[in-house]
């Protein structure tokens, strides 16, 4: 089986070896040291300010999306949410649930965010801006320079879900003035699902300190105070945190975040070059390196996904809902090589010979 989905993805042998060991007791100086190292490396790779802090929540990415909104925004805020697909829609739901006043900006499916779309919202009393920098459901990667400048001009608190983009696309928290950056264990970190990560700027830390959140498990105040000594309020997914440690150290040892991003970009480009000879259309105008969204010109996208899975042992990522027959996605994150791309291309060529595409 080769897994080209966008998460969970394939892990390195070193990460899998850590996963095969017994999970140790964690209220120890040894585990605290691992957590401190994880915090330092995440900050370094996110290019966060020295004063930034990192929280590791046991829960999938959505837990960190909800925790970020709950702990830093209030009904006194007025937020803009970019809703270009199912992950943008999730932020809309979270804000409604927590009674955060929002305005949605909805780029068309597969389309970038433009200055024209933002213009009507200049100087309109907004306080916050929420975006999934890579809207994984459609493959669109939004222009962070555009967003960053808009937020600076308008003094907005900037929350960025970079769950599927962290490590795959270059990101500079300090330069963009992002106050929160979120990622998760099962995307380009290439570990099992179960841990999500929030990086908080000084401004975000001040908002958390002032927040009146009424949730015990997702209260970032207690996560941050426990984190000062490398601990968590409750039993975390200890094994995954150890796997994350192995993975972060491996990235650091082989050239750091720039080298990792370059590797993923090269793999994506290799695939995009090779797919050009087959009857598929790439359907996003501004792509992340993490994924290529494809529209089969001669078949149902869902049928291509099923045939690849059942007859070739290859998993691509189907789309949900209205898009399921039209688009499927090929991921470039996780332990994958150009030779794996070749296997997928060969399988698609075979399907073409068989008249299936
Ligand atoms: C994967 C992903 C999430 C998190 O989803 P979970 O299933 O909760 O891990 C959130 N946002 C984006 C953009 C994602 O790609």
Image: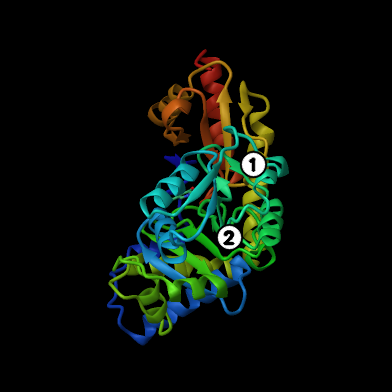
- Does the beta carbon at disc 2 come under 8 Å from ligand 1? no
Q: Nearer the viewer, residue 268 or 216?
A: 216
Residue pictured at 65% horizontal, 42% vertical: 113
Residue 348: numbered disc:
none
Which comes sooner in the sequence, label 1 or label 2? 2
Can see residue 329? yes
Q: Nearer the viewer, residue 147 or 295?
A: 147
Q: Is residue 237 above or below residue 345?
A: below
286 relative to 189 in the view: left or right: right
- Quarter of the rendering occupied by the N terminus: top left
Q: Is residue 339 above or below residue 108?
A: below
Q: Nearer the viewer, residue 118 or 54?
A: 118
Q: Secondary structure at mark 1?
A: loop
Q: Is residue 270 above or below residue 100?
A: above
Q: Nearer the viewer, residue 141 or 348?
A: 141
Residue 33: percent from left, percent from top: 43, 82
Residue 79: percent from left, percent from top: 53, 53
Q: Write down the residue under mark 1.
A: 287
Q: Write down the residue under mark 2.
A: 158
- Asked which quadrant contains residue 224, the reply is bottom left
Q: Residue furthest top?
A: 355
Residue 337: percent from left, percent from top: 58, 47
174 relative to 317 in the view: left or right: right
68 relative to 339 in the view: left or right: left
- Asked which quadrant contains residue 129, the reply is bottom right
Residue pictured at 60% horizontal, 41% vertical: 140
Residue pictured at 42% horizontal, 29% vertical: 321
């Amino acid at each position: 089986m080769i897994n080209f989905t966008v998460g969970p993805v394939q892990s390195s042998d070193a990460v899998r070896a850590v996963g095969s060991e017994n999970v140790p007791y964690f209220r120890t100086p040894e585990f605290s040291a691992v957590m401190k190292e994880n915090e330092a490396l995440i900050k370094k790779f996110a290019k966060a300010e020295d004063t930034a802090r990192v929280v590791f929540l046991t829960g999938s990415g959505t837990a960190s999306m909800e925790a970020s909104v709950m702990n830093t925004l209030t009904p006194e805020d007025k937020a803009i949410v970019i809703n270009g697909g199912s992950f943008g829609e999730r932020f809309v739901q979270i804000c409604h649930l927590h009674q955060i006043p929002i305005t949605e900006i909805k780029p068309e499916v597969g389309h970038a965010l433009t200055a024209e779309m933002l213009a009507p919202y200049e100087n309109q009393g907004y306080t916050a801006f929420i975006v999934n920098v890579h809207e994984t459901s459609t493959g669109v990667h939004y222009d962070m320079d555009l967003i960053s400048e808009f937020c600076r001009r308008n003094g907005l608190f900037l929350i960025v879900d970079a769950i599927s983009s962290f490590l795959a696309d270059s990101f500079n928290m300090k330069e963009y003035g992002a106050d929160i950056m979120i990622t998760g264990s099962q995307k380009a970190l290439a570990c099992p699902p179960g841990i999500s990560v929030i990086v908080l700027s000084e401004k975000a830390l001040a908002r958390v300190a002032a927040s009146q959140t009424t949730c015990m498990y997702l209260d970032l105040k207690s996560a941050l105070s426990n984190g000062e000594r490398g601990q968590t309020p409750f039993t975390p997914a200890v094994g995954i945190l150890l796997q994350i440690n192995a993975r972060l150290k491996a990235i650091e040892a082989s050239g750091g975040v720039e080298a990792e991003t370059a590797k993923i970009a090269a793999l994506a480009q290799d695939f995009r070059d090779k797919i050009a000879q087959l009857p598929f259309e790439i359907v996003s105008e501004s792509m992340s390196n993490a994924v290529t969204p494809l529209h089969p010109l001669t078949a149902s996208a869902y049928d291509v996904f099923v045939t690849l899975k059942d007859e070739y042992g290859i998993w691509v990522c189907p789309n949900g809902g209205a898009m399921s027959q039209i688009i499927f996605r090929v991921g470039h994150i996780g332990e994958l090589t150009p030779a794996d791309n070749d296997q997928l291309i060969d399988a698609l060529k075979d399907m073409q010979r068989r008249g299936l595409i």
